[in-house]
Image (cartoon, rainbow, N blue to C red):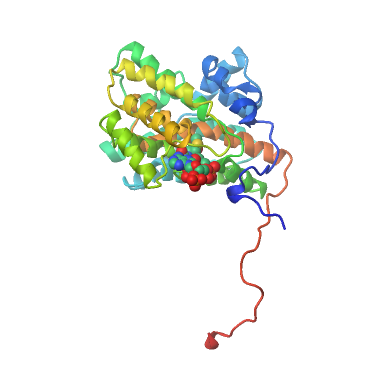
Amino acid sequence: MTTTKGGLADVVAGQTAICTVGHAGDSLHYRGYSVSELSQHASFEEVAYLLIYGELPNLQQLKQYKQSLHSLKGLPQPICHLLKSMPATAHPMDVLRTTCSMLGTLEPVSANHTAQDIANRLLMLFPAALLYWYHFHLEGRSIDVMVEADSIAAYFLKLLLGKFENTIALHELIEKTLDISLILYAEHEFNASTFTARVCVSTLSDIYSGLTAAIGTLRGPLHGGANEAAMSLIQEFETAQAAEKGILQKLQDKKLIMGFGHRVYKTRDPRSDIIKAQSQKLSVALKDKKIFAVSQKIEEVMRAQKGLFPNLDFYSASAYYFCGIPTILFTPLFVISRLCGWTAHCIEQLQNNKLIRPTAEYTGPSPKPFVPLNDR
Ligand code: ACO
């Protein structure tokens, strides 16, 4: 009998040609391209295409792809009704999970509506559904989701914030930050939510089921929910000094500090410095004197005390905060991005499918005789 480490740590659970995590000095590559280069030189739409179709698009393909994405905007009436009927107290992750499942009944998979088509549709529908629900319940108004925008980041920000009050330079920095963040969140090998999606479609269930299950898995604070938890933590402190004292106390109390540590990376999360740089730029542009300083202090204390480094979620929190994004929308943004990776994995799983069904090491009682109800 083989005993595995808890949480399947270090277990190679399958093969993938989509992504490498943690190889060669804790780097990250999507289909061979380093995430650092992609975030510097590509747009999120190029990365979405790379993950969904397998290759980076050329100029013409990108133009067509963006046109086709924007033709996929719009919320079907039953989805609008559904969003209105969900309570204002719902977590937006539950809103997306339910919306995804509902869309599967309205626009099911078929030979003419493939996993790739569905991913593209959801790239445009998720921001719309999320922000339709958000504005309806917060402001009591139904927003028009058919607005013009040149990118998914711009579309999200337009639906969230409406008219920009900021200067053009700041507006561009915010849009760029969101675009980069979508690139960084897009794919990450056999993480919990992606593995969930693969297990689901390995039964030959449909892609909507895989994506819905993945959203439910991403929701938890040990996975995608960490960016929201990290923001709440940062906002607990008024100064860097208070952050130092507070984190030391939490560590003494054996509390988990959200946004730190990683199952696979050993020395650093290669995405963290990229989003940290964006967060710092925004902090300077907005003349922030608190949030970035508190974040840096938390990082410093975590390194010194635990040897732990920030993962992508930690500085994504302050970056999103500076972009004017409410905390409850942080993990849903992760969904909008990661849906590309999930789709790529579902497609890959089905190309060479084998039911994913491991075995367990039994730790229960030895066989014993059945006791009739009246004798127990
Ligand atoms: N805060 C405090 N201590 C920590 C943290 C943390 N964030 N992360 C790990 N540790 C400690 C553990 O308490 C443990 O200490 P011990 O050996 O004294 O008991 C040790 O480091 C090893 O931690 P494990 O939990 O065994 O490591 P594992 O690989 O299982 O966990 C995980 C990885 C879940 C990410 C963990 O680091 C964690 O809980 N981090 C906080 C949640 C988080 O940020 N999640 C986002 C992940 S990245 C993403 O989804 C984009």
In percent of the image, x 31 and y 38: which residue is there? 246
Instruction: In this rendered view, identify the residue nearer to me: 53 or 217.
Output: 217
Question: Residue 236 falls in which quadrant of the image?
Answer: top left
Instruction: Please state if 319 lies on the left or on the right of 376 as rendered.
Output: left
Whether residue 24 is visible here, answered yes or no, is yes
Q: Residue 37: x percent and y percent?
A: 57, 17
Question: Residue 92 falls in which quadrant of the image?
Answer: top left
Instruction: Please state if 205 lies on the left or on the right of 175 as rendered.
Output: right
Image quadrant holding the N terminus, namely: bottom right
Instruction: In this rendered view, identify the residue nearer to me: 196 or 162.
Output: 196
Instruction: In this rendered view, identify the residue nearer to me: 140 or 344.
Output: 344
Whether residue 103 is visible here, answered yes or no, is no
In percent of the image, x 68 and y 49: which residue is there? 356
Q: Residue 278: x percent and y percent?
A: 42, 20
Image position of 365 with respect to 103: above or below:
below
Total numbered badges shown on the rendered structure:
0
Image position of 337 with respect to 13: above or below:
above
Q: Residue 59: x percent and y percent?
A: 60, 12
Q: Residue 197: x percent and y percent?
A: 59, 43
In percent of the image, x 42 and y 24: which residue is there? 155
Image position of 97 with respect to 309: above or below:
below
Question: Residue 20 falls in which quadrant of the image?
Answer: top right
In percent of the image, x 28 and y 26: which residue is there? 290
Instruction: Please state if 128 lies on the left or on the right of 373 as rendered.
Output: left
